[in-house]
Image: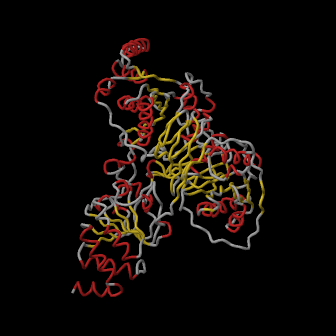
Amino acid sequence: MKYNCVVCVKQVPDTKRITGDAMTEEGTVNRGALPAVFNPEDLNALEQALWIRDEYGGTVTVLTMGPPTACEVLREGLYRGADQVVLITDRAAAASDTLATSYILSCAVTKFSPDIVLCGRQAIDGDTAQVGPQLAQKLTFPVISYLEELVGLDDGKITVRRNIGNGWEVVSSKLPVLLTVTGSANIPRPPGARRMMKYKKARSAAELTGQVADEMPDASQQEKATEVKKRCEALKGRGLLLEQWSLDDIEADLAWCGRDGSPTKVHRVQSIVLAGGEYREFPPTDEGIAELVGDLIEDHTIG
Amino acid sequence: MIDVNKQGEVWVFAEQESGKLSEVPLELLVKGRQLADALSVPLAGVLLGDGVAGLADTLIAHGAEKVYLAEHPLLGHYQAAGYARVLCDLVEQHKPQICIYGATPLGRDLAPTVASAMWCGLTADCTDLQIGDHTDPITKQQYEKLMLQIRPAFGGSVIATIVNFDRWPQMATVREGVMPLGAPQSGRKGQVIRFKADLDGATLPLELIETRRRAKKVNLKAARIIVSGGAGVGSRENFRLVWDLANSLGAAVGGSRAAVDLGYVDDDHQVGQTGTTVRPALYVACGISGAVQHRAGMAESAKILAINDDPEAPIFSVAHYGIVGDLNDVIPKMIKAIRGGAGVKGAAEVAKA
């Protein structure tokens, strides 16, 4: 039996690299200095989907919502073996919280009538882990979160081992189902060299629009539009035009999208400067260390 | 979603497994009490399960004035579908203004499912909740006495405060260990309100095949002293040094994410943004460079001692005491000094002389 998998992925700033150059003098994060990456656990979700396809047949579709620059993760999905990729991009989707995001994704995922939807457990920029379960609810699919191992898949029934914090459980579910995949589930395959050669020039219409605007600053709107169309068709002919959908294309109700569709609003954001109080350095000698330990004993911190 | 209801109660989801409450809902009741007092509304626990009525007294002893109790065989083993359905029914009927959950794997599965079903807001992994006012920056409309949902974001480098002023209830999951556990008071009186779970004849989607739980090997939250190691320790074998130093201090052993990822120490021991948040009397960081995610999880320790051979390591920016040196050399010296005990001060004087 073949399975059609849809993997929802996110491009995120690499918050694991907040060191050195990425810190300002004041000790806050310089976001511009952080590279944008494929969210790590989304790679595990993709790997799980590719494994299912390779084992049982079917297709793997990678879906992302974001600005045109998010096409980078779609290309990475193609390099690693995805059959098709789709960018959902729309100004009206900006500032969506997890609820609005899951609504928008649900409108797109439905188009594929998938058997299995996979998400990374959580994204490293927000660490909320909410979009997976919310998307499942919107799709009316059962959710199995924190997947650590796929135990079995046959005859429309999936069995997985999931992490429950202080242990694990094995559960099974009928398909369709939504899985959120943890980093320990598998080791994502590297990009394939031949696929990289093939897809490195793949672009979406939104990216081509940006390209044309950069290259032809003095052209009229009409000329630019014609050029974009020409480039789109050229890529399409070679199978390198990345599919791009707007909220209209997926028939999303705008009332549930973007800022208006998001019940949570930011009240305040504070950069935190983690600084200690008084600092004393002791030399790494017997005497220095004995003095430190003596001080700690004296103020009853130890002993 | 439900309408804004300023008279609504404050609810704490009372997570239990196999008929036992964990510490998380009891910690949440302490915070729930503060929120309910600030709003002058009752505080209630919401208890779902099968044969769990006996736990209501514990919730009352920890400050719940009411306990909503729903028992059903299909609630015996947790799964999102059954729990979310009952919770949504309860919310629709009683219209609480606030509903908080532990940010446990269960809470992080259940709360989003409820939020999605009710089209209401949810903030994940809060480290604090307060009551305060909010002015919408676009409409300039003012909203009074909202739940301010405070959480680290962006890998722990910023603190974001989130509000939900129109699509209620206001919901949040709260990180384990960030609220102190209150002592139970046996004299407290409370009301238990039974709620009939509408699950008769229902079929839930997941089938449980097997479950395996293990006791946590280490309780970092309760430790007075923590000795932690990072990637700089070099190997799982060398992590012995961290264990030895911890033993000499009667301390618990922690580890940075890097140390856990490298397999030097098990993930129960992980301190930081994605591990446990700790605030011991003394935190000794050995060979930990101090990524912001790690610092976010330990910076509130009363005293921090950093041992690292790189004087530029960010860990020194939060430390109170620092030793720049090779931990293979420093730790044995430190153990020796500690074993020297009370006479250490004297010994230092002697050594100096």
Whether residue B29 is situated above or below residue A153 in the rendered picture: below
**Which of the colour schemes (rainbow, by chain, secondary structure, one colour) is used?**
secondary structure
In the displayed structure image, the side of residue A160 where residue B136 appears, left or right: right
Whether residue A116 is situated above or below residue A201 in the rendered picture: below
In the rendered image, residue B134, in percent from the top left (x then y), is placed at: 62, 48
Would residue B46 be seen by someone viewing this image from the given angle?
no
Looking at the picture, tell me which residue is in the foreground, A299 or A145.
Answer: A145
Residue reaching furthest front? A155
Tell me the quarter of the picture where residue B306 sits: bottom left
Would residue B283 be seen by someone viewing this image from the given angle?
yes
Q: Residue at x 28, y 30 (%)?
A: A193
Looking at the picture, tell me which residue is in the foreground, B340 or B264.
Answer: B264
Q: Residue at x 31, y 28 (%)?
A: A196
In the displayed structure image, the side of residue A244 where residue A262 appears, left or right: right
Q: How many marks?
A: 0
Tell me the quarter of the picture where residue B176 sits: bottom right
